[in-house]
Image (cartoon, rainbow, N blue to C red):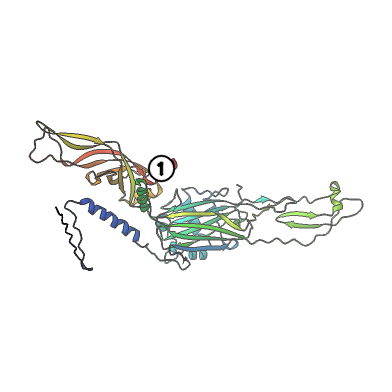
Amino acid sequence: MTVTETFRLEEYSPMEFRPRRPSKGSLGTYMNFALALFLMLTSAIPPTFGQTADTAKRSDDTKVETDFLQEKASTAVSVSKTALGFINEQDGAISNTRAFDLLKALLRSPDQAYVKTNFAGLFDAKGTLNETLVEKKACFIINVVVWTPTEATQNTDNPSTSSPTQRWYVFRNGKLAQQKRLLGVHTFYFLYIHLNKGDASYLTRYDFTSTEATPIFLQHLYALASVLTTETQNKAENLQANVWGGRQLTFSYATSDIAITSKITNLATTTPEKEKPAINNGSSSGTSTGNAQTFLGGDYRLVSASDKARPSAMTLDDTPAKKAPPTPKDGSLDSPVTFHNEAGPWLDINIGFPATNVNELSFDSTSTGFTPKTVDKRRLFGLLNFYPFPKQRIQLAERNFSWIPSLIAGLPLASQPLHKPVVAVGWGPPLLQVYIGSIIAKQDKAPAGTTLTKSVCTGWCPQFTFGVTFSVTALKDKLTQKK
């Protein structure tokens, strides 16, 4: 027997396109297409550009902008007595209740020409400080540098060289923030305060680098995919010993990482005084000549070798050593500090762990008909947490607790996820929330024309559920630690 096989060759026009129509009820196909389209659009959306200051420059990298502030300590603004009352001069600490008062006192300094030039955005057309803007809307990064004067001692090659202690603060919404975090701003105000500077002369430079960052929501989305796969100074003695300065900065990217690098250059030079007349060293053999010099605030006398052999007969100056001003070393004033700049997201990705089971319905055929049978299963859920209120979004950014419930929706991390969606409300910090809601499970229907032995819910049936949600970032960190 001969078997003949026939093949049909059909040629399509290059311009002809014949899409395949999905079968009816293929909801999963549409959902996958929608998810792919969403990821494509979110990754392709260009950054939002604002009005950039003239001093902010783009680097060769299109996602990086830079700016700087450079000032001499001798030309900075003196910290007033009123402002000194709102800051601890020993360690530079600023209390939350006094931060706003400190800013007002500094911005009302007598040197209004400097303040209104460098902080122009905080003043109205009449030149009046807008206190509401300072307290409620403006964002400040504050750097406090506390120098520690040291005693100048004799026969020291490098006396009075000290390293300062530093503190960094973020002030917004009338209080100090708990994190180095800005809330998606294009413009912020940088302010530095140098305490116990004394007469030290140096040049300070702050460099700002704004780098476009990936929004936290997309970071969590990618993470979910990976999971599935010293001494107090006298205030009245010298106000110039405490100085401050700063400026307004504007960058294009509202979602960015802002790195601040501080450098210092010592401008002080030490010149010896003219030679003083020789003084009697107390020796009966005559006098010994020497040079009296003032070095870094202390009086010293250079004597000959023969005088050193008779220390008991030598008379030294009884002038007490003075406090020497700090002598900063050239180089970095502090290690680079990075502030994340992003508005509180209106949604977040979490993993949900239900404390209840999902009842799945099936049917067993018996002689009397079909008997419904339920199977309890518990699965993890991928959840979207929605935060519709601005206060919630701020608390999410700061990782504070909130009693305002978040809206939760999600799907199980299992086969046929569209058959068991969950809707709920949650309470608690974004890191760990408790949720209560309902799983709307699609149950099998009995075959047509059959008799059920008992009444059950078929089709879409709600089931009560509660449990906890975990931050994807925290879960990823835990899994990384175990490896």
Q: Is residue 270 left or right of residue 422?
A: right
In the displayed orientation, state which residue is furthest to the front.
1
- Which element carries disc 1, helix, strand or loop? helix
Q: Residue at x 39, y 64 (%)?
A: 50
Q: Position of residue 482 (x, y in %)?
A: 43, 40
Circle count: 1
Q: Position of residue 419 (x, y in %)?
A: 22, 44
Query: Dot 1: within a 10 Å radius of its alpha carbon, few (fewer than 14), some, or many (20 or more) residues?
Result: few
Q: Please give the residue where the numbered disc 1 appears in the rendered image.
A: 479
Tell me which corner region of the image, top left, top right, bottom left or bottom right, holds residue 72. Answer: bottom right
Tell me which corner region of the image, top left, top right, bottom left or bottom right, holds residue 341. Answer: bottom left
Q: Is residue 89 left or right of residue 41?
A: right
In the displayed orientation, state which residue is furthest to the left.
449
Quadrant containing the C terminus is top left
Above/below status of 157 relative to 114: above
Q: Position of residue 103 (x, y in %)?
A: 48, 55
Q: Residue at x 23, y 47 (%)?
A: 418
Q: Nearer the viewer, residue 39 or 161?
A: 39
Q: Nearer the viewer, residue 249 or 10?
A: 10
Q: Nearer the viewer, residue 443 or 164?
A: 443
Above/below status of 96 relative to 51: above
Q: Amino acid at mark 1?
A: Leu
Can I make out residue 283 in this image? yes
Q: Is residue 289 left or right of residue 357?
A: right
